[in-house]
Amino acid sequence: MKKTILAMILSVLMVGSIFAQQKVLTKDERMAWWREARFGMFIHWGVYSLPAGTWDGRQIGGIGEWIMNRAKIPVADYQNMAKQFNPVKYDPDAWVKMAKDAGMKYIVITSKHHDGFALFETKASKWNVVDATVYGKDLLKPLAEACKKYGIKLGFYYSQAQDWNNPGGAASRKITKEGWANPDSVTIDAYTKEHKGHWDPRQEKRTFDQYIDEVAVPQVRELLTNYGDLAVLWWDTPTNMTVEAAKKLQSLLALQPAIITNDRLKRPDFPGDHKTPEQRIPNLADLDSTDWETCMTMNGTWGYKSYDHNYKSPETLIRNLLDIASKGGNFLLNVGPTSEGEFPPESVDILSKIGQWMKVNGEAVYGTTSSPWGLFSWGRCTNKATPKGTSLYFSVFEWPADGKLVIPGVKNSVVSAKLLATGAKVKATLAKDGNLTITLPSAAPDPLASVIRVDVKGKVANQPVQPAK
């Protein structure tokens, strides 16, 4: 009898365990960590880092990872070049530590970009780092291990439709100014026009449906199965995508019930969990209640180009992060490693400077929500609920000449106010008309962005949007 009862108890526990594992998470449950994180690293890496923007003795316009498409490189030539891909300086531990030290909470890497080259071992195509290069090792597994070590969430970018090497993949003819290509440097010949963007007959040896069934579906299954818990699957781009193909890929997400996806599987039928404005920060008027994430390059390219040294300053990127957070979005900032597996020195320096600022001021970003006031001409505001009220973070870009910041329409009693950079208290006076005046020292304590934290009682009501410069 005892054995029977014990067996019944174990059976119930097992069923309960299985049920718990199969629990369907709500969107809010899946998005909780993402909304807390606010800041992540994008990594564009692949065979395109070898030519680094130059082909056949000439610099190819546009972004680095599109060089095969823009230079119309034959499939055989591009694949032959991959034999030289040998990232012997690749140190995933160092990569992840740099992201963590920069204040980033998650990483999204191009597991396969539009050139079809897989950074992982795959049975679906020989066009991968293990079979097609002298390096011969999976690049994603050690990165997944490093992310787990440092507590960084990991996501995979996957080009589900465009693929210029695996036969049957789509090839875009679209030219835009949003980071895809430089329209002044591209000409579309007659063959490409007639062959739906393709320029090499080898690209059309199979149909798009065959490509989806034989390459995309099995590779996505491998990504969702072989690398532990994944936080994000970042689709890109839906060129020639069909509803039927999208359904096949979407169904695989059941392998990772907690995963987050973006809006690029197939618009508008598959909206995903968040929107993805590229190389731009939306205006307040363009935003709705949908979660969103701006992805942006540090210089002018996603994939490495040896001659692109036009980097944004740490000040610009920090202020971009604050602008995005003040509007309720996330910032996915890109690094394009070299073919040897190193981050460009400019990127390393920028990440270090951002990290120094984030160590002091990160609380003004993590877990915050959008500004109750919209935008200020002198800076941005984020806020965070606390057990006793609200913490308001005023990030000042332009230090007031008279030493005073005036915040209109405040109906909450002030508990305390201080500068995050120094910890020094500042005077915050609430007038009867609802104007909160913060009296500041004569000079800004941080030239990049100085943050004043003001703790108030209760929840702060939304105010009319203030105009920005």
Image (tube, rainbow, N blue to C red):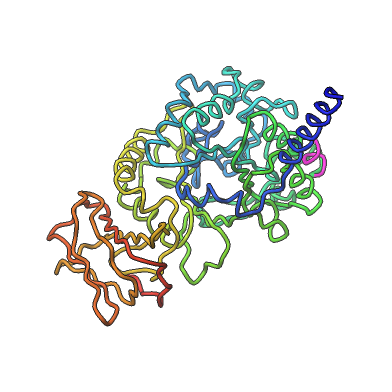
Residue depicted at 66% across the width and 25% down the height: 121
For the residue pair 16 and 65, the one nearer the viewer reads as 16
Residue lying furthest bottom: 433
| Quarter of the rendering occupied by the N terminus | top right
Residue depicted at 45% across the width and 39% down the height: 335
Judge from the rendering whether residue 395 lies leftward or rightward of residue 32; answer left or right.
Answer: left
Q: How many badges with numbers are in the image?
A: 0
Q: In which quadrant of the rendered view does residue 379 lie?
A: bottom left
Q: In which quadrant of the rendered view does residue 114 lie?
A: top right
Measured as percent of width and height from the top left, residue 26 is found at 66, 53
Judge from the rendering whether residue 353 lies leftward or rightward of residue 71; answer left or right.
Answer: left
Judge from the rendering whether residue 269 lies leftward or rightward of residue 1; answer left or right.
Answer: left
Q: In which quadrant of the rendered view does residue 217 lie?
A: top right
Measured as percent of width and height from the top left, residue 314 is found at 32, 47
Residue depicted at 14% across the width and 69% down the height: 402
> Is 53 above or below relative to 243?
above
| Magenta segment | 209-214
Judge from the rendering whether residue 219 lies leftward or rightward of residue 180; answer left or right.
Answer: right
Decide whether the magenta segment is chiefly helix, strand or loop. Answer: helix
Measured as percent of width and height from the top left, residue 131 is found at 66, 21
**Residue 106 shown in magenta:** no
For the residue pair 83 and 90, the one nearer the viewer reads as 90
Measured as percent of width and height from the top left, residue 451 is found at 28, 56
For the residue pair 296 and 455, the one nearer the viewer reads as 455
